[in-house]
Image (cartoon, rainbow, N blue to C red):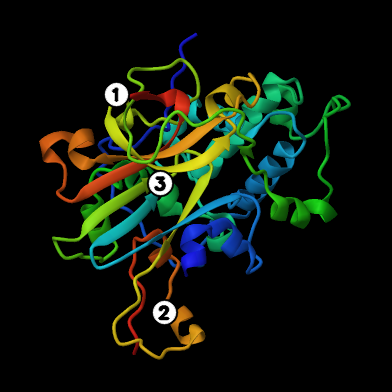
Amino acid sequence: MTYLLRDATAAIASLGYSGRQGEHMVVVENTSERHNLVVCTLCSCYPWPVLGLPPVWYKSAPYRSRAVRDPRGVLAEFGVALPPDVEIRVWDSTAEMRYLVLPQRPPATQGFTEEQLAALVTRDSMICTGLPRTPA
Amino acid sequence: MTYSTHADLGGKPCAAPIVNEPEDACFHAAWEARALAVTLAMGATGSWNLDMSRAARETLPDYAALSYYQVWIGALESLLLERGLVSRDELSRGHALIPPLPVPRRLAAADVPASLAKGSPTERPATRPARFAVGDVVRTRAGHVSHHTRLPGYATGCVGRIERLHGVHVFADAHAQGAGEDPQWLYTVVFEGRELWGDAAASGLSVSVDAWEPYLEAS
C-alpha cells in the first residue's frame, strides 16, 4: 500500500496494468478525515488501464460543472452522505496525471483475505462517487 | 483570431441531474465504439497530437448540444478537413473520392494492443530546476488566453499552494498550437474552496488542479 501511494505508476505496472491514459498515475487515500473525489472539468481524463473507459456521467456537463463546486450535492445524487466534519478534496485532472482513490477499508474486515477485500471495491469507490461495499 | 472553448465547465451553472448507470455500461450504440476506434487510429497516424485533438473538440461551435462521441467525430472531421485528408464531398458521400494523402505512420490492427499498452508518456527529462517547491504559495495566471489551455477558468487568478511536483511534462498549451513539446515543470496546486467560490463555498472543501509552471507566479 505504501508503494501504491508513493509510486502508483510503478506499483500498478507491477500488477500488469499500464498504458494509454494511465501513463502517469497518482493514488490518493480516503480516510475518516478526508474524502477524495476525481473529476476532469475540461474533458474526460480518466485512468483507462485500471478503470476502463469513463462512464457517461463522468463525461457529462452536470458532473464536470458541479463536482468542483458542490461535491456534497454530487455525492448525494449517488446516495453518498458523508459526516459534516469530513473534508472533501476534489482532484481536477487537468494535465496527464491520472488519479485513483484508495477507498477506506470498511469496518469489520479485519482478517479478510485480499480476495474478500477486493470483492468490496467498486469502480465508483475508486473515483469516489461511491463507497466500498460493506461485508454482508 | 479569438479562441473560445466550450468545454471549460468547472463551476458553471448546470442544474441537470447526474444520470448514473450500471458499471458495465460503456457504449450506447455501435457507432460510438467505431468513433473511439477511428479517432484513436487517426491519432496514431501522427497527423496531429492529443492536445490538438482536445483543442478541436472544445472549439466545436455546437459542443454543448452534442453527445460525447458526436464531439469526438465532429473534431475528427474538422482535423481531417483542415489537413486535406478528407473532403466535404467525401464525408457526405461516405467514401473516398480521390487517392488518400500520405500520413506519417499507420497503426496496424495487430499492433493495437501493444500500442495501447505502451501509451504516450508525457514526462521529459528536466533541463532546469523547478521554480517552486512543495508548500510555496502561488497565484495562477489571470484572464483569457487565445489558445488551448489546461488551466480551468474557475482557477484563474487564484492563490493556492504547491502540493506535489510531477516532474517535467509536455506543455499542452504549446503542443496544441504546433509549437513543439516545450516541456515544463508540472505541479499539483491546491486551493481552498473559499478562494474559488467565495463565502458560499462548502466548508471543508479544497480543490486541486495540475498546473504547468507558466501558469504560476509566486504570491
Name the residue rendered at 34%, 90% in the picture.
A136
Q: Picture coordinates of residue A21 (x, y %)?
A: 59, 49
Residue at the (26%, 60%) spot, across then down: A34
Measure how far apart labels 1 and 3 are at the Cα level: 26 Å
Mark 3 is surrounded, within 10 Å at the Cα level, by few (under 14), some (14 to 19) or many (20 or more) other residues, namely many
Q: Nearer the viewer, mark 1 or mark 3?
A: 1
Amino acid on which disc 1 is placed:
Gly
Judged from the image, the secondary structure of the residue bearing numbered disc 1 is loop
Chain letter, disc 3 residue: A
On the same chain, marks 1 and 2? The answer is no
Q: Residue at x 13, y 61 (%)?
A: A84
Residue ID for mark 3: A60
Q: Is residue A101 above or below residue A20?
A: below
Q: Chain of mark 2?
A: A
Residue, disc 1 = B157
The amino acid sitting under disc 3 is Ser
Q: Which residue is mark 2?
A: A120
**Residue B27 visible, this orientation:** no
Q: Is residue B184 above or below residue A72?
A: above
Measure how far apart labels 1 and 2 are at the Cα level: 42 Å
Using residue B163 as the reference point, say whether residue B128 is left or right of it: right
User: Please, what is the three-letter code of the amino acid marked with disc 2?
Assistant: Leu
Q: Position of residue B137 (x, y in %)?
A: 30, 32
Q: Nearer the viewer, residue B4 or B190?
A: B190
Query: Mark 3–mark 2 contact, CB under 8 Å?
Result: no
Please, which chain is the residue tagged with disc 1 on? B
Vertical side of A118 occupied by B144: above or below: above
Mark 1 crowd level (few <14, some 14–19, many ≥20, 10 Å Cα) = some
Q: Return the residue found at the far top.
A: B1
Q: Secondary structure at mark 2?
A: loop
Q: Callout 2: 10 Å neighbours few (<14), some, many (20+)?
A: some
Disc 3 on helix, strand or loop?
Answer: loop
